[in-house]
Image: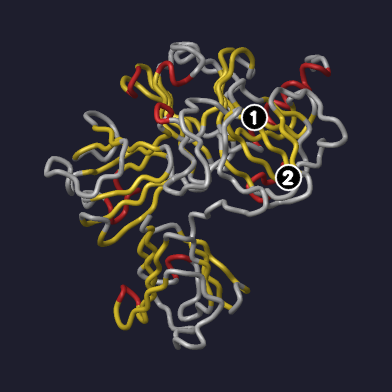
Amino acid sequence: MPKFSIALLAIIFYSIDLSAQSNFITLHEDCDFKGKQSILEPGNYSTYQMNIGNDKLSSIQIPSGMKVTIYEHKNYKGKSKTFTQNIPCLEAEWNDFASSVVVEGSNYNPRYNQNTYVTFYNDCYNKGYSKSLKAGSYKGDALGLLKNKISSFAIYGNLKVRVYLNNEDATGYNHTFNETTSCLSNMYNDKISSLVIEYDYNQGNNYNNGNNNGNYNNYGNSYVNIYSSCGYKGNSLRLAPGQYQGDKLGILKSAISSIEIPSNLQVKAYVSSDYLSGNYYTISENINCMTSTLKNNIRSLVIEEKNQSSNYNNNQNTLIDSKVTIYVDGNYKGQAVSLLPGTYSSMQQIGFPNKALSSLTVPEGFRVVLYENENFVGKKYTITQSKTGFSFSGWNDKTSSIAVYRDR
């Protein structure tokens, strides 16, 4: 039996474990997950965007539920190969030969900003059937009722949309949109067969998404990395500028031991509240191992530019949610489902009992239309604010289809 040093085994197991617990894939310049590395969320990356150099890829860490396709040439051309699990060392045919990569993951949900998505509509001016999609590649049938039927779309967050006309494989001629489009021209209207949604780092991380609760523009590719163990090890999260309540930190809430901060950013760390209130400590440089005051005590945080005056009110939670949540019982209790903007022709489609809606939360700027029957038929009721119940309107347990709109 071959003999391995305990140190080498520890490195290998640590690398594999980190990938399994992350929602990002990691590219490595050398085999066995060594050398220069680049952490990527779902999206498309060509040459320099891979961050390890052209024709340098040798190994990949891929968490469960994610998929990586590497291409021989830049801009996703030439031969390709797809992987769904860790690759300690690419075969000779591919080692140091990849020039672009596509990262996909049906289980992926960006942790650092729940407000980034694109809502597509069948008709111009944000009307008709609609569906919200997060960063990733959507080929042909993955678009469902949107395939060849997109006329307008709204972009929320620092995203861009690359569309392919009459091509269901997201290859070949394409056009990129960086802004919300109220009505596509005849060249694109009802002709988009596949598309890719990716993060637009050239625009910076605009966390505002239409509200005035902060100003986090022009960050480029700057992130803060937080770790569960000292020495920048253990479970980790990569966070863009923004506001993070306790639940947004996931398993790292009250479990942060070290932090990496780029020179242009600072972190306000709250140790007494999950909701960004009360006293906070400002961190403006890397900490290899936190003191007892902060270690395993940070429950929420704000990431912002140094010396920037923020409109954020420390005594009030101003983080705007991007979803409507419906409940089977009054007062926001019982079985619940959260919905991004879109039209849902039946409650079964969203995994919610038919004619059982009794209360719902509606974020500011959202509009919800309830329908008495499936497929948006029968009486309807429009709601623009949260409701603990429907005792006065008579709509308790009456909803069979629902539409969610984001008006601003």
Q: Residue at x 57, y 52 (%)?
A: 318
Badge 2 is on which residue? 253
Mark 2 and mark 1 lie on one chain; the one further toward the N terminus is: 2
Residue 207 versus residue 407 in the image, above or below:
above
- Outermost residue, front side: 309
Q: Is residue 171 left or right of residue 184?
A: right
Please identify, in this view, whether the residue under mark 2 or under mark 1 is nearer the observer. Answer: 1
Q: Quadrant of the C terminus?
A: bottom left
Mark 1 closeness class: few <14, some 14–19, many ≥20 residues within 10 Å: many
Instruction: Residue 118 in the image: state x and y as whole percent.
Output: 37, 47
Q: Residue at x 37, y 74 (%)?
A: 382
- Outermost residue, left side: 186
The residue under label 1 is which amino acid type? Gln
Instruction: Residue 199 in the image: state x and y as whole percent.
Output: 43, 34
Residue 283 versus residue 301 in the image, above or below:
above
Q: Residue at x 52, y 38 (%)?
A: 66
Separation of residues labelled 2 and 1 (CA atoms):
18 Å
Instruction: Residue 3 in the image: state x and y as whole percent.
Output: 81, 14
Q: Are marks 2 and 1 in contact (CB under 8 Å)?
A: no
What colour scheme has been applied to the protein in the rendered image?
Answer: secondary structure
The residue under label 2 is which amino acid type? Lys
Residue 383 versus residue 294 in the image, above or below:
below
- Residue 19 in which image quadrant: top right
Question: Dot 1: what SS?
Answer: strand
Instruction: Residue 245 in the image: state x and y as whole percent.
Output: 65, 49
Q: Residue at x 79, y 15 (%)?
A: 4
Q: Is residue 407 left or right of residue 12?
A: left
Q: Is residue 5 left or right of residue 171?
A: right
Q: Which numbered marker is on residue 266?
A: 1
